[in-house]
Amino acid sequence: MDEIKLLEQAPLFCADKHVSYIVRLTQQLSSPDSFEGALTEHLKMSGVYWALTALSLLTAKKTVDELMNTAEIVDWVITCWDETSGGFAGNTGQDGHILYTLSALQILALTDNLNDPRIQFDRVVRFIASLQQTDGSFVGDAFGEIDTRFTYCAFQSLALLQALHEIDIHAAVNYLKRTLNFDGGCGANIGGESHAGQVFCGVAALSIACRLDVIDGDQLGWWLSERQVDSGGLNGRPEKQADVCYSWWILSALSIIGRVSWISGDRLAGYILKCQDGDDGGIADRPDDMPDVFHTFFGVAGLSLLGTLHRGENINRFSRTIDPVYALPSDIVRNLKLPGQVMIHDELDSRLAIYCTLEEKTR
């Protein structure tokens, strides 16, 4: 099937229905008696971040504040701070973890509350720094699991708190280099199979450290572009089905290394649009599956990176664009002057790599 037919068959982007879906789902997540609330109780912090960021991309800030009652959300985030560890938990009464610490800080950044006096941010910094191991890697909490996701979480969290100097960046970068595989990708740890989600974490962490020079952009770009399948969607590793979430993991990594053009954006946009629930809103992992807040966020984020809203219409419905490194609205990243680096790919000479900061890219 050629691209013209794919474009003709792709539905319109149901922005208003997605907004309604997110608001409705957020209310369900807040109810302890709901099925959705029970299933996601342990990761509610991340669910709120996904919902809040998706709404921030789809509507004006004032509208987000009204739809989500962000003041109430911030109050809830405060209750999830674990005074024992210094980190944030996935929900009230649980233990702190680096994953939910990042989600909490992203929520505070989205709501302009990174200076909330109720939180001892110096203790949050100490919690994150304490998770770094002697080889430069990071564990997620006291139980000691090592994962490249945690390095990214630590880097972004400390960047948001302007405290990257509190960890050994050099050791962390060297550890990330050791996770790189022969195919250009990287895994959860040294020797782990290359996976698109882990690739994003490694590439974005190196961007924050301004050390993209350790990456072979062409080799990694080839591996990432090979993830596009016949449906136009992207998979996370070879021989797997496409999933909307990889629209973010892969597009963001390609954006950071300057090789988004190596995949078909039109075909990918068509796939994401076909994964929408046209009746009730929300985006699923695959066409005709049930939507959820996770895939709704990553679908909206992927379309934001592509600059795509309506098929066949030159209308940009997105209120804000998303930053490929921080997964936050770009204006927040600019206002906070967060560190980062992107690769400018020269199509005429693939051996030439030019690096610029996130701030320079937006000028």
Image (cartoon, grey):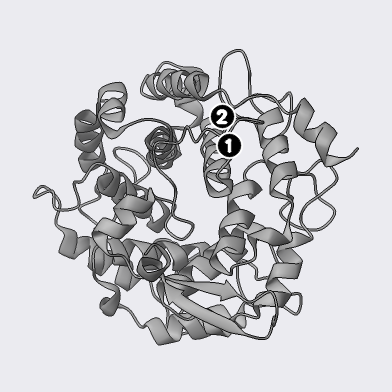
Q: Quadrant of residue 318?
A: top left
7 versus 156 height, above or below: above
Side (left or right) of 216 relative to 105: right
Number of numbered callouts drawn: 2
Q: Is residue 195 left or right of residue 74?
A: right
Q: Is residue 179 above or below residue 226?
A: below
Q: Position of residue 179 (x, y in %)?
A: 62, 77
| Relative horizontal placement of residue 134, taking residue 343 as reference (left or right) | left
308 sits to left or right of 223:
left
**Residue 254 x %, y %:** 62, 62
Residue 295, numbered label: 1
- In the rendered image, the vertical position of residue 216 relative to residue 88, given as above or below: below
Identified at 44% across, 49% down, the residue is 322
In the displayed image of the protein, which residue is found farthest to the top?
279
Q: Which quadrant does the N terminus fall into? A: top right
**Residues at circles 2 and 1 in contact by the CB criterion of under 8 Å:** yes
**Which residue does the image show at 58% across and 36% down from the upper left?**
295
| Disc 2 from disc 1: Cα separation | 6 Å
Residue denoted by label 2: 292
Image quadrant for the C terminus? bottom left
Tell me, for residue 25, which label it has, or none: none
The foreground one among 129 and 209 is: 209
Helix, strand or loop status at disc 1? helix
Residue 172 appears in which quarter of the rendering? bottom left
Q: Residues within 10 Å of mark 1 (few under 14, many from 20)?
A: many
Give, as a three-letter code, the residue at label 2: Asp
Within 10 Å of disc 2 (Cα), the crowding (few <14, some 14-19, many 20+) is some
| Picture coordinates of residue 44, whole percent (x, y) | 40, 36
Residue at image position (35%, 67%) is 359
Say if 80 sits above or below 158 in the image. above
Residue drawn at x 61%, y 55% is 251
* SS at badge 2: loop
